[in-house]
Image (tube, rainbow, N blue to C red):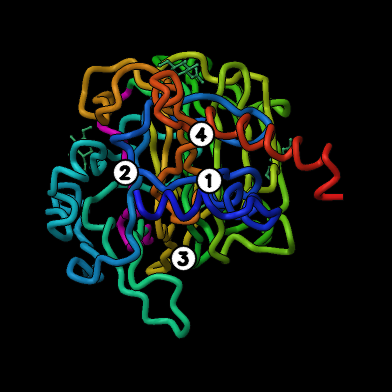
């Protein structure tokens, strides 16, 4: 009360009004949006050309996992590698297993027509690796390894446990390093009995390619007869003179009727043709099969997809753990952003209709009030 009385006795000066305004009204800078957490978010609004609302958010951070770091020796036996153990307890913890599975399939049944080598996916090729480079941008990262061995190609793939994703914005800060003859990829995938019925939006890097070339595709990009479907693909150049061996944020927005790709916030490709329509898995992999797309790796050569973090905002029609609500109810009253955040992985609140409608001083309520006060100041010539 004493403080209030003192303030009310002060002459209202221009400077005190400005202080009042700047203290209560986040009028301009995105930096002033409040950091929050997923339990407070009803939904997420993405930025970019195909801005959409999504109901859920997951963030996988591989940057400070020293306790799980270690590069496992390659298993050189085709018969046992698919059944290998996870490489650390990170991959058996619920935080991982409620979203991801480690692939162990091989291409003996479902090979591409021109594959020339047995490819076997192994959990042993998915591991947390310590950053031993100077000037580290993270202590650790996730590595997906593929290596050519005398008898087969060992490969790595993580797949979402759920096949019920329907529209998403998927991002990874990643790079591809290693020898020629491999492919690394981040994509959505819906399996089908025939090639023509596959639904898939792809980001693919071929280590045979020039280091600035990335392939973006709404599959299938070829027919059973081996013909190219040119409209399905955009071959793009990494922006800003970057190469895919550099760390960059690769983003894919799958929205109704359109897939849009970005590198470090620059849009690099957009394809409407054959955009997936039905529920899909999310997959990352690192592979080769000696076919015409991947090429051949030389014996013992290896290539790696390395990921510092992986983030996705999405809708799911499923009933699995990925479909669980964070706690902010089923309404989109509290709208968050994972783009305009100062802290990667933590959302900011864009606006809160719930608070506004309770008269609780939500952002929506404050902006008009602040704007009105500015108008008063401007029209009375005080800010002229
Ligand atoms: C995601 O689901 C919400 C409803 O929960 C809906 O309002 C929104 O439009 C959906 N997003 C897309 C891209 O379909
Ligand atoms: C390849 O997968 C088939 C089942 O699809 C399995 O029977 C076979 O043992 C696997 N081969 C290897 C080398 O893992
Ligand atoms: C993209 O590049 C691949 C491989 O170099 C090539 O086969 C394909 O025809 C290209 N597609 C387009 C649309 O440029
Ligand atoms: C890969 O090597 C095999 C022989 O080991 C060969 O049959 C195949 O054509 C090669 N693939 C490519 C794309 O050159």
Q: Earlier in the sequence, mark 1 or mark 3?
A: 1
Q: For residue 133, which quarter of the picture?
A: bottom left
Looking at this view, is 356 or 4 the one in front?
4
Question: What residue is disc 1 on?
Answer: 24
Q: Disc 2 beta carbon < 8 A from ligand 2? A: no
Looking at this view, is 365 or 98 the one in front?
365
Start-end of magenta stretch: 146-163
Give how far apart the Cα atoms at labels 1 and 4 are: 10 Å
Question: What residue is disc 3 on?
Answer: 298
Residue occupying image coordinates x 50% and y 27%:
200
Q: Which mark is residue 158?
A: 2
Give how far apart the Cα atoms at labels 2 and 4 are: 40 Å
Within 10 angstroms of label 2, few (less than 14), some, or many (20 or more) residues? Answer: many
The answer to whether mark 1 and mark 4 are in CB contact below 8 A is no
Question: What residue is disc 4 on?
Answer: 363
Task: Say whether residue 184 is visible.
Answer: yes
Looking at this view, is 252 or 228 the one in front?
252
Kind of element beneath mark 2: strand
- Residue 19 spot, x, y in % from top left: 60, 55
Give how far apart the Cα atoms at labels 1 and 3 are: 63 Å
Residue occupying image coordinates x 44% and y 56%:
343
- Residue 128 spot, x, y in % from top left: 27, 63
Residue occupying image coordinates x 51% and y 34%:
363
Mark closer to the observer (2, 3): 2
Give how far apart the Cα atoms at labels 3 and 4 are: 59 Å
Mark closer to the observer (2, 4): 4
Kind of element beneath mark 4: helix
Q: Earlier in the sequence, mark 2 or mark 4?
A: 2
């Amino acid at each position: 009360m004493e403080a209030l009385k003192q303030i009310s006795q002060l002459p209202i000066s221009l400077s005190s009004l400005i202080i009042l305004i700047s203290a209560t009204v986040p009028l301009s800078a995105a930096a002033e949006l409040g950091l929050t957490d997923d339990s407070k978010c009803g939904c997420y609004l993405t930025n970019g050309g195909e801005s959409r609302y999504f109901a859920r958010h997951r963030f996988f951070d591989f940057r400070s996992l020293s306790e799980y770091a270690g590069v496992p020796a390659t298993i050189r036996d085709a018969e046992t590698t698919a059944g290998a153990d996870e490489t650390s307890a990170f991959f058996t913890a619920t935080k991982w297993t409620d979203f991801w599975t480690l692939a162990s399939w091989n291409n003996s049944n479902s090979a591409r027509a021109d594959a020339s080598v047995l490819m076997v996916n192994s959990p042993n090729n998915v591991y947390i690796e310590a950053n031993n480079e100077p000037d580290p941008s993270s202590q650790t990262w996730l590595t997906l390894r593929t290596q050519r061995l005398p008898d087969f190609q060992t490969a790595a793939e993580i797949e979402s446990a759920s096949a019920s994703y329907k529209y998403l914005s998927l991002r990874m800060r990643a790079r591809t390093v290693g020898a020629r003859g491999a492919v690394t990829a981040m994509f959505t995938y819906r399996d089908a009995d025939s090639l023509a019925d596959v639904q898939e939006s792809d980001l693919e890097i071929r280590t045979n390619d020039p280091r600035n070339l990335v392939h973006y595709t709404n599959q299938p990009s070829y027919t059973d007869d081996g013909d190219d479907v040119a409209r399905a693909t955009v071959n793009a150049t990494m922006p800003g003179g970057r190469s895919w061996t550099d760390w960059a944020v690769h983003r894919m927005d799958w929205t109704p009727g359109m897939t849009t790709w970005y590198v470090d916030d620059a849009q690099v490709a957009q394809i409407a043709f054959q955009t997936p329509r039905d529920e899909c898995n999310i997959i990352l992999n690192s592979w080769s099969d000696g076919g015409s797309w991947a090429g051949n790796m030389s014996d013992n050569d290896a290539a790696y997809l390395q990921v510092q973090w992986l983030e996705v905002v999405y809708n799911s029609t499923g009933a699995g753990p990925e479909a669980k609500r964070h706690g902010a109810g089923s309404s989109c009253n509290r709208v968050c952003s994972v783009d305009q955040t100062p802290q990667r992985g933590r959302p900011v609140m864009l606006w809160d209709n719930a608070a506004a409608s309770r008269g609780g001083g939500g952002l929506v309520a404050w902006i008009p009030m602040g704007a009105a006060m500015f108008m008063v100041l401007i029209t009375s010539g005080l800010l002229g």
